[in-house]
Image (cartoon, helix red, strand yellow):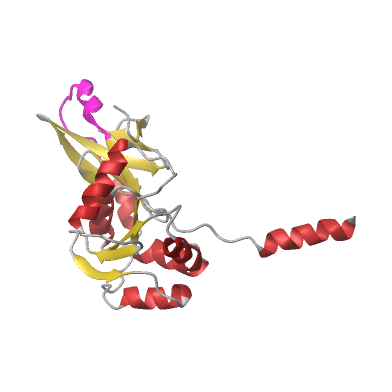
């Protein structure tokens, strides 16, 4: 009995793999994140549940610890999926179709490395050799890694003073979370401004201006402080 249990444990451990890097489905939010972090976007046009070469690329490259580590520090990832069985919202299907036409994609997998404006740096497809070969190909047209920002930036931004003058707080209802991308250092698109945790910016809401500080970013919501309020507010992705 003990040998059986041990064999099962060894089998499970031997087949355990680290999760792949996060792939966003929001192209516009990804471009914003690329501009903030000074890194390129890797767009993967795929048929995730039927395309054999797409599935091989995911298993051999994207689901490996080597690519996961590289992507977290050097890339913003976007998946543009055309599945047969996996459900998608009508809005996502329409957005993916528009991207397919924009980049003139005719087969899968097709990948583009683009800059923060959407300009193509290189086009790729499936290639043998695993993550090492794939990463080496990406590096041929990738810009050098930007230096890490000073650690004091976040602290200063988190303690900016409240904006001056009384503001009708009903204007706060115009704040909206439009997208979240990235995992190692996620970026939240609030109204039309990209925030990382600790960032504080003045947003214009009609005729009013409010100071918004990003306290934390989660998978589907952010916590913010508006005009120096003591209690943070919650913005939920997709909320109306």
Q: Nearer the viewer, residue 200 or 186?
A: 186
Residue 97's spot in the image, x, y percent? Answer: 25, 48
Residue 85's spot in the image, x, y percent? Answer: 44, 44
Q: Quadrant of the N terminus?
A: bottom right
Left or right placement of residue 66 versus residue 194 in this view: right
Q: Nearer the viewer, residue 147 or 33?
A: 33
The magenta span reads 161-176
| Total marks in image | 0
The stretch drawn in magenta includes residue 174 = yes
Q: Is residue 103 above or below residue 145?
A: above
Q: Nearer the viewer, residue 219 or 234?
A: 219
Residue 43 position by quadrant: bottom left
Residue 25's spot in the image, x, y percent? Answer: 34, 48
Residue 223 position by quadrant: top left
Q: Is residue 167 above or below residue 141?
A: above
Q: Magenta region's main secondary structure?
A: loop
Residue 144 in view, yes or no: yes
């Amino acid at each position: 009995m003990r040998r059986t249990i041990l064999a099962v444990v060894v089998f499970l451990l031997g087949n355990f793999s680290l999760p792949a890097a996060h792939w966003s489905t929001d192209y516009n939010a990804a471009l914003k994140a690329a501009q903030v972090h000074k890194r390129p976007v890797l767009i993967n046009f795929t048929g995730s549940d039927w395309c054999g070469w797409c599935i091989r690329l995911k298993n051999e490259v994207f689901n490996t610890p080597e690519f996961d580590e590289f992507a977290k520090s050097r890339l913003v990832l976007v998946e543009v999926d055309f599945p047969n069985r996996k459900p998608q919202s009508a809005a996502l299907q329409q957005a993916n179709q528009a991207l397919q036409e924009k980049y003139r994609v005719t087969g899968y997998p097709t990948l583009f490395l683009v800059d923060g404006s959407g300009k193509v740096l290189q086009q790729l497809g499936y290639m043998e050799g695993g993550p090492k070969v794939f990463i080496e190909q990406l590096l041929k047209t990738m810009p050098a890694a930007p230096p890490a920002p000073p650690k004091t930036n976040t602290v200063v931004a988190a303690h900016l003073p409240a904006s001056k003058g009384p503001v009708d707080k009903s204007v706060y209802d115009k704040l909206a979370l439009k997208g979240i991308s990235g995992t190692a250092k996620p970026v939240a698109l609030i109204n039309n401004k990209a925030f990382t945790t600790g960032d504080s910016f003045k947003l214009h809401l009609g005729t009013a201006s409010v100071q918004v500080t990003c306290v934390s970013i989660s998978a589907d919501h952010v916590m913010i402080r508006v005009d120096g309020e003591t209690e943070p507010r919650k913005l939920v992705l997709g909320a109306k």
